[in-house]
């Protein structure tokens, strides 16, 4: 998948590495952003990175992304509220499956 943009309080941050080099002109229009509780953008970016990014290549996992956006979901507060140790079980299971 590469990277995603998170936005909070009118600020945006890129999470993960894009698959191809690109140039952004702020603000980047978001087609269907996930809605999450308002948090400082740097905190939000760090949480999303911890939940969705594959460490070895610094890319957002398509498998994890599909879980979060299942059936067109746009509310994702649960992703940030779920305890880290519980999400790690889900994450490890999803990333291990082929």
Image: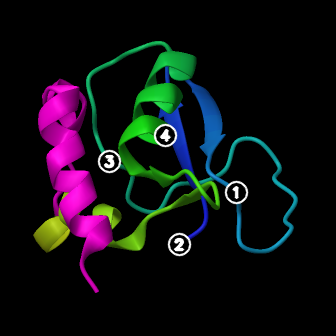
Relative to 55, residue 88 above or below? above
Does residue 75 appear in the picture of this structure?
A: no
Residue farthest to the top? 40
Which of pointers 1 and 3 lies earlier in the amino acid sequence? Answer: 1
* Inter-mark Cα distance, 1 to 3: 19 Å
Membership of 72 in magenta stretch: no
Give the alpha-carbon distance from disc 1 to disc 2, as whole Å: 9 Å
Mark 1 vs 4, N-terminal side: 1
Which residue is disc 1 drawn over?
A: 17
Give residue 1's mark.
Answer: 2
User: Which colour scheme appears in the figure?
Assistant: rainbow
Q: Secondary structure at mark 1?
A: loop
| Secondary-structure class at tag 4 | helix
Q: Which residue is mark 4?
A: 49
Name the dominant secondary structure of the magenta segment: helix
Q: Earlier in the sequence, mark 1 or mark 2?
A: 2
Q: Do the residues under discs 4 and 2 have CB atoms within 8 angstroms?
A: no
The segment highlighted magenta reads 73-98
Name the element at disc 2: loop
**Number of disc labels:** 4
- CB under 8 Å between discs 1 and 3: no
Crowd tier of the residue under label 3, counting other residues whose Cα lies within 10 Å: few below 14, some 14–19, many 20 or above: some
Query: Badge 1: few (under 14), some or many (20 or more) residues near its Cα, within 10 Å?
Result: some
Q: Which residue is mark 3?
A: 34
Residue 27 sits in quarter: top right
In the figure, 62 relative to 68: above or below? below
| Marks 3 and 4, the one that precedes in the sequence | 3
Asked if disc 1 and disc 2 are in contact, CB closer than 8 Å, the reply is no
């Amino acid at each position: 998948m590469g990277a995603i943009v998170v936005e909070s309080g009118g600020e945006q941050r890129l999470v993960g590495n894009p698959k191809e080099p690109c140039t952004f002109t702020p603000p980047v229009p978001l087609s269907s952003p996930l809605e999450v509780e308002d948090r400082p953008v740097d905190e939000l970016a760090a949480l999303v990175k911890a939940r969705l990014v594959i460490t070895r290549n610094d890319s957002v996992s398509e498998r994890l992304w599909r879980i979060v956006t299942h059936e067109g979901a746009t509310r994702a507060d649960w992703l940030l509220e779920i305890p880290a140790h519980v999400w790690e079980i889900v994450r490890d299971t999803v990333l291990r499956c082929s």
